[in-house]
Amino acid sequence: MQTIQFDVEDNHIDVFLTLLGNLKDGMIRNLKISKNTSENNQLHQYMQTSQFQKDKKIFQQRFDDIQSGKATTVPWDEGFSELDAYIDAVS
């Protein structure tokens, strides 16, 4: 099996999908469509870095701590009230 990636202009995507739809059954095993934006490219590049792996590990640990009850959380309103008070104090 081979994988092929196409970059199709937005104004031609309907025609391209029609062409793919007219191929024999079973010729395409998987079809994935994604919007190719600079944000997606930046995210993809970041996800390939060691910093991403470090950040992922930290966030996973924080999530596990919350799930297990090891970390304490505050209600949304209370947290934002504290944040607003802090911002007022440093402004």
Image: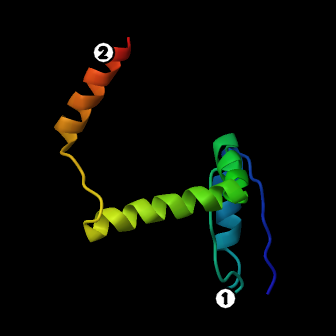
Residue under the point 18% across and 45% down: 75
Quadrant that contains the C terminus? top left
How crowded pointer 1 is (Cα within 10 Å; few <14, some 14-19, many 20+) is rated as few
Considering depth in this image, is 30 or 66 the residue closer to the camera? 66
Considering depth in this image, is 66 or 35 the residue closer to the camera? 66
How crowded pointer 2 is (Cα within 10 Å; few <14, some 14-19, many 20+) is rated as few
Identity, as a three-letter code, of the amino acid under mark 1? Gly
Q: Is residue 64 left or right of residue 77?
A: right
Instruction: Assign a secondary structure to mark 2.
Output: helix
Which percent across, then down, holds residue 39?
Answer: 64, 42
Q: Is residue 74 left or right of residue 4?
A: left
Residue under the point 78% across and 60% down: 6
Residue under the point 63% across and 55% down: 14
Identity, as a three-letter code, of the amino acid under mark 2? Asp
Which percent across, then down, holds residue 59?
Answer: 47, 58
Which percent across, then down, holds residue 32?
Answer: 62, 67
Instruction: Please tell me whether mark 1 or mark 2 is closer to you in this view.
Output: 2
Q: Relative to 15, does residue 23 appear above or below in the rendering?
A: below
In the figure, residue 71 lies in which quadrant? bottom left
Which residue matches tag 2? 88
Q: Relative to 71, does residue 89 appear above or below in the rendering?
A: above
Q: Which mark is residue 26?
A: 1
